Image (cartoon, helix red, strand yellow):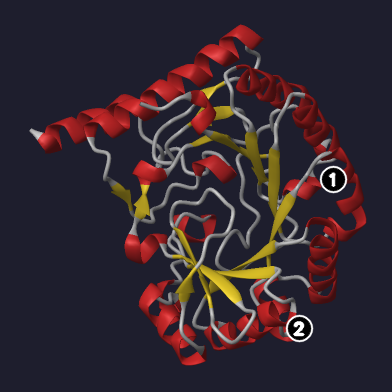
Amino acid sequence: MFAPQDFHLRIFLESHCNFRCVYCNPDAERQEDRVISDEEIIDFLNVASQVGIRRVHYSGGEPTLRKGLPDIIRAASRLGFIDQSMTTNGLLLSRNIDAYSNAGLQRTNISIDSLRQERFQSLTGKDCLKDVLSAIDKAVECFGETKINIVVLKTNVDEIPDFLEFSHKYSGKVVCRFIELQTNQPIFFQGHRINHLHVTHEEIMNIVSSYGEQVPVFIAGKNPNCSYFAIPNTKARFGIIANHSRGYPCGGCKKVRLSPYGDVGVCITAEGTNIRHTTTAQKKEILLSQIDYRQKLDEVNPHRLHLSSDYGFWRWGDLNPSNEARPIPMNSILLEKEIANE
């Protein structure tokens, strides 16, 4: 039986990003609608704190594009959130990190897919590797342990040893997370498949094995599909997220998601409930109903896995209203599981 305090929030603050990564959203697609207001986000944080939720992770798009981010972080601190973290591409982080830290941010994950300037620019569409490296320095200085996210492709797989050396250079304070390419990004929605760039979990681990033995270690975080390792006789530490190869262990996921457009949900493949223009009491009712729904999912099948799929709704909005690859009604998932178990 789940209690609300077992959950944490994942708030997608922006659908927009200032990078144009080739594997993600190079055409800057997003739903044509206004994002949810800072005030409504803070009101949702308020009701989450009332039911006992104390952890929140900010994401996007690119969350640092949200001008009100320091105010949101500060409000969460005031409401009793004890763990606030953020995933960012790092471009704007250095200039704002003190404001975020002073407001109450405690950790950052920084995306960096190459340590080589030309390759970084070709992958992201931005010539700003120095800015991102500076952001990593600042994050380590400000927060200590910092995770960096590397989407592994055929075009950068040769840099896995370089990233392990990078972690070693920082005495393990920089933890590399090698992420398998997933198909839940806009680049895949219009048929522009880049599956030929996919590198499997097995291939990634084989390359790491040539660097040294892997010893499982604990590293703070709430991603049930990330396994972390240290490499003896070095200070390198890394994790691997392989949702495509291994499936996402839904039974271990206790996220409540809030999309940039105000949809609240607990399952990435199910429709959320929109909280725009709702009262505080209504937001609380919506939140508790989603937590109850999450409990029912586990009663039906606690060991289910989600494979990587075309559900990008939670980050980018409803880009393809006529496309079958979109979130489905909550009750449909439960019915489907019940039928499968009969």
In the image, residue 61 above or below residue 1: below
Which image quarter is the C terminus in? top left
Q: Name the residue under label 2.
A: 117
Residue 312 seen: yes
Q: Nearer the viewer, residue 310 or 95?
A: 95
Residue at the spot 56% in from the left edge and 36% down from the top edge: 8
Residue at the spot 84% in from the left edge and 32% down from the top edge: 71
In the image, residue 30 above or below residue 132: above
Judge from the rendering whether residue 26 lies leftward or rightward of residue 137; answer left or right: left
- Residue type marked 1: Tyr
**Nearest to viewer (mark 1 / mark 2):** 1
Q: Mark 1 points at which residue?
A: 100
Instruction: Tally the numbered discs.
Output: 2
In the image, residue 336 above or below residue 148: above
Give residue 152's mark: none
Q: Quadrant of residue 90?
A: bottom right
- Residue type marked 2: Gln
Q: Quadrant of residue 35?
A: top right
Residue at the spot 71% in from the left edge and 62% down from the top edge: 145
Q: Is mark 2 on a helix, strand or loop?
A: helix
